[in-house]
Amino acid sequence: MGKKPRINLARRDNLLEKIKKTRELLYKQLDSKSINSKEVLQTSEELDKLILEYYRNTEINPKENEDI
């Protein structure tokens, strides 16, 4: 079995930026005085999808993936 093809750096950086922004949005929603459970759940699910996409498209290497 060969190694998985590595994701190109631009795509990797784009995914990392999306993950960062989605995580920040989730934290902001959770810090809000009036938490909208539906919005929090949607944001959390989106964050999960982005993280899964990142790991599915990169070679699992803990040193490379410290940004997540």
Image (cartoon, grey):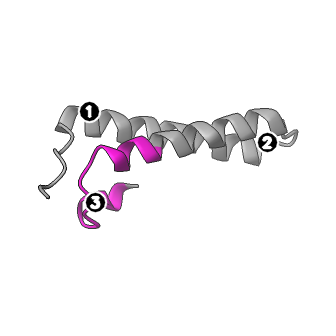
Which amino acid does the dot numbered 2 rest on? Ser
Q: Is residue 16 magenta?
A: no
Residue 49 appears left or right of 62: right
| Circle 3 residue | 60
Under circle 1, the secondary element is helix
* Residue 40 position within the rendered picture, expressed as x and y whole percent measured from the top left: 74, 39
- Residue at image point 11% right, 55% down: 2
How packed mark 3 is, by other alpha carbons closer than 10 Å (few <14, some 14-19, many 20 or more), is few
Which amino acid does the dot numbered 1 rest on? Arg
Which of the two marks, 2 or 1, is nearer to us in this view?
A: 1
* Residue 61 position within the rendered picture, expressed as x and y whole percent measured from the top left: 25, 63
Under circle 3, the secondary element is loop
Q: CA distance from mark 3 to mark 1?
A: 16 Å
| Circle 1 residue | 11
In the image, farthest residue toward the left: 2
| Circle 2 residue | 32
Q: Earlier in the sequence, mark 3 or mark 1?
A: 1
Viewer-proximal residue among 33 and 44 = 44
Q: CA distance from mark 3 to mark 2?
A: 35 Å
* Residue 27 position within the rendered picture, expressed as x and y whole percent measured from the top left: 65, 47
Q: Earlier in the sequence, mark 2 or mark 1?
A: 1
